[in-house]
Amino acid sequence: MANDERDRFGDKLRQKEKADEDRFFAERDKAALEKLRQQGSASGVEHAEMCCPKCGERLVNVDEHGVTVAECPAGHGLWVDHHQLETIAKRERDSWLGRFFYRPKR
């Protein structure tokens, strides 16, 4: 077998190994995601539901001056997405944040 043929054969072998490896990990990831979906549906938790990473409580949507933020009911934080940040940035910078952080607790 000539060197050129060996190189092509080696390249094909490496490509096949890579494809097998990619397939293995894709199947493993698919199985793990399905297991998570089943656990979520068994516990009655919807996938779109967001939970606080600190305490696990379900986040509550709160409307603050036209911007909806996801807030932990136990006070561990709030979450906003890119669109919400753009909306906030268009407004007066200090006044909205000041009113949000120092508003009366419910």
Image: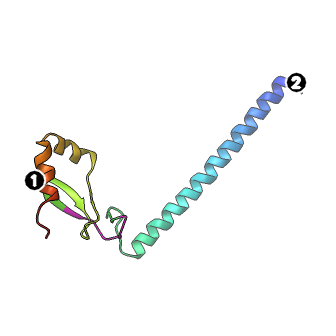
Where is mark 2, residue-wise? 2
| Residue in view at x 55 percent, y 62 percent | 31
Residue type, mark 2 in image: Ala
- Residue at 62 percent of width and 50 percent of height: 23
Q: Residues within 10 Å of mark 1 (few under 14, many from 20)?
A: few
Range drawn in magenta: 53-61
Residues at marks 2 and 1, CA–CA distance in whole angstroms: 74 Å
Q: Nearer the viewer, residue 88 or 10?
A: 88
**Left or right for 104, reference 81:** left
Q: Secondary structure at mark 2?
A: loop
Q: Is residue 77 left or right of residue 43?
A: left
Q: Position of residue 59 (x, y in %)?
A: 27, 65
Q: What percent of the width, then of the height, locates residue 4? A: 82, 23
Q: Is residue 57 magenta?
A: yes
Quarter that holds the N terminus: top right
Taking depth in this image into account, of 17 and 72 the one nearest to the observer is 72
Q: Nearer the viewer, residue 1 or 93?
A: 93
Residue 89, position in %: x, y? 18, 41
Residue type for callout 1: His
Position of 60 with respect to 90 (left or right) is right
Residue that carries the numbered disc 1 in the rendered image = 65
Q: Quadrant of residue 70?
A: bottom left
Element at badge 1? loop
Q: Residue at the bottom extreme?
A: 43
Q: Which SS type dominates the magenta stretch?
A: loop
Residue at image coords 49%, 61%: 33
Corner quadrant of residue 75: bottom left
